[in-house]
Image: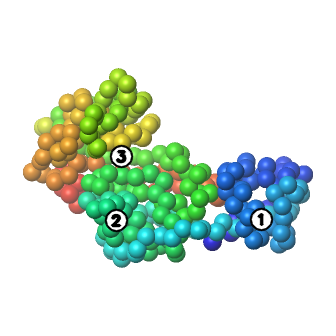
Amino acid sequence: MRKIEFIITSKDNGRQIRDFLRDFGVSAALLTKLKNTENGITKNGEFAKSIDLINTDDRLAIKIVENGKSPKKLDNTDVKVCFNDEDILVLDKPPFMPVHESRNHQGDTLANVAACYLDNMPFRAVYRLDRDTSGLVLIAKNELAASKLAGKIKKDYYAVCDGILNGNGTIELPIRRVNDSIIKRGVFDDGERAVTHWQAIKNTDSTTLLKINLETGRTHQIRVHFSYLGNALVGDTLYGNSSDKINRQALHCKTIYFIHPITGEEITVDSEFPKDFKKLI
């Protein structure tokens, strides 16, 4: 359960509770859930209806009760906790670990690690990373945080690609699933809009370390875009070639930036490059 309290200021004096909560980011579905929860909405410690009015200095509170359960717990000390409070958990996912459970992965995923910190709450990853991509994954601990954060997290990815790139640029090429493939994506005129911004950080004699920001979030977007340009990520066997220097695609989500959904604070969370990525660069 998550209880969130508000002290009403003069700018919201005389408003209905439902209007105040909707402006804060409470969805219509969550508002209905609050109304059906015992003391889901209270004003100055007393039960309140969503149509009741609020006044300056009132103490308004909502109580979010979770119905689902978290997955089976996996105590994995290799997964670092980079941020943790009542609303948000950020884990540094190692390579080769799936984010979600599936038919072939039960009990060995990031969701199972997160369960150790969720106190029987559902697993809500606000975005996902590919199994072999490493880096930060943000998990919302309640549906209000999840809805307010969806699509609003800026991420700094770092990748090593084949070939020499200099300066910076933007790739805007549409992406969709390759015909008859369950997994593979490609650039096609009838695909969905996909925009990737990149900056070259340093070169070797045959590769480039890139900092990448996504304007859109298509599946495999970074891997597809650079492969299409002839600069596939090092080690990416699906869109490029294997490498004797790293046994996965060289891609890491290093830093995330977001506005805290409850406090409004600007948050930056950073991670270290994993060992194989450090060795490569």
Looking at the rendered structure, the secondary structure element under dot 2 is: loop
Under mark 2, the amino acid is Thr
User: Is 174 rendered above or below residue 39?
Assistant: above
Name the front one of labels 2 and 3: 2
Q: Which of 206 and 188 is in front in this view?
A: 188
Comes first in the chain, label 2 or label 3: 2
The quadrant of the rendering that contains the N terminus is bottom right
Under mark 3, the amino acid is Tyr
Name the front one of labels 3 and 1: 1
Under mark 1, the amino acid is Ile
Comes first in the chain, label 1 or label 2: 1
Looking at the rendered structure, the secondary structure element under dot 3 is: strand
**Rendering coords of residue 184 (x, y %):** 27, 40
Which mark, residue 157? Answer: 3
Which residue position is annotated with label 2? 109
Disc 2: CA contacts within 10 A as few (<14), some (14-19) or many (>=20): many
Which residue position is annotated with label 1? 41
**Rendering coords of residue 91 (x, y %):** 41, 63
Disc 1 versus disc 2: distance between alpha carbons? 36 Å
Q: Who's the residue at 64% across and 69% down the image?
A: 65
Disc 1: CA contacts within 10 A as few (<14), some (14-19) or many (>=20): many
**Rendering coords of residue 33 (x, y %):** 69, 61
User: Is 88 rendered above or below residue 167?
Assistant: below
Location of residue 50 by image quarter: bottom right
Disc 3: CA contacts within 10 A as few (<14), some (14-19) or many (>=20): many
Direction from residue 138 to residue 108 in the image, left or right: left
Direction from residue 147 to residue 131 in the image, left or right: left
Which mark, residue 59? Answer: none
Q: Who's the residue at 85% across and 71% down the image?
A: 46
